[in-house]
Image (cartoon, grey):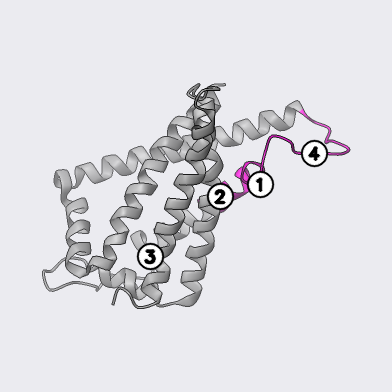
Amino acid sequence: MAAKATMAVTGIVLLSFVLGHMAGNLQVFLGPEAMNSYAEFLHDFGHGLALWVVRAVLLACLVLHVASAAYVVRVSKAARPVGYVMKKDVATDFAARTMWMTGLIVLAFLVYHLLHFTIDPLGAYHDFVDAEGRHDVHRMVVTAFQSLPTVAVYVVAQVLLAIHISHGGSSLFQTLGWRSPRNAKWVDRIGPTLAAVILVGNLFIPLGVFAGLAS
């Protein structure tokens, strides 16, 4: 099905971004200079045009990913208009059964995350400038994660993202025809492994900052 293939391809792009975003944000523990220099590089790369190209590609992938997922769910429900009297999941797990739910919650968190750090409609971080005259991203992140409710929101969101990736990261190989009896054992471990790495890395940022490791 074309919708599933679209979900898989866009999933690869989005997963790559999640890994890169995590690696970049972990620089908060290297100090203000490293973090703010990294942010300035991203902002000025290609005279700023490259950043908007990347954003446009990511937005397109996100829209296609969500639209394809909604179509697949709708087709699946239409194929079984009457629910099972007794449903028993055999070749599935919790992550697979909750893909639509974790996906929707992560999407809602993404909107919150963009409003929180990128758009900043209340102007909470607009005046944060470092000694070099750059936007002080390091101070922004450290300040944001002094709030326990904010940390809690990010922790819950990262756990749900990891659950989503643990299934999606492996199932995309099946969708694209890259899984076979010969490689099935290690392919099935890719999703959970990626999910674990991303979970640890992304949780370390809010929890580490809250603990005072990035003052």
Residue shown at 84%/32% (left/top)? 82
Upstream in sequence: badge 2 or badge 3: 2
- Circles 4 and 2: CB atoms closer than 8 Å: no
* 54 left or right, relative to 71: left
Residue 163 has which mark?
2
Determine whether label 2 and label 1 are within 8 Å by CB.
yes
CA distance separating discs 1 and 4: 12 Å
Amino acid type of the residue tagged 2 in the rendering: Ile
Front in this rendered view, residue 159 or 104: 159
Q: How much space separates mark 4 and mark 2, taking CA atoms? A: 21 Å
Whether the residues at callouts 1 and 4 have beta carbons within 8 Å, the answer is no
Q: Amino acid at mark 3?
A: Ile
Give the residues drawn in magenta, as a range: 80-107
> Compared to 152, does 49 lie above or below?
above
What is the spatial separation of the Cα atoms under label 2 and label 3, in whole angstroms? Answer: 18 Å
Q: Position of residue 180 (x, y in %)?
A: 53, 22
Residue position for label 4: 88
> Dividing the image into 4 quarters, which one contains the C terminus?
bottom left
User: How far apart, in angstroms, are the residues tagged by discs 4 and 3?
Assistant: 39 Å
**Label 2 to label 1: alpha-carbon separation:** 8 Å
**Residue occupying the point 50% across, 74% down:** 149
Q: Which residue sits at x=21%, y=51%?
A: 42
Does the stretch in magenta take in 100? yes
Query: Is tag 2's residue or tag 1's residue first in the polypeptide sequence?
Result: 1
Q: Nearer the viewer, residue 3 or 119?
A: 3
**Disc ID at residue 94:** 1
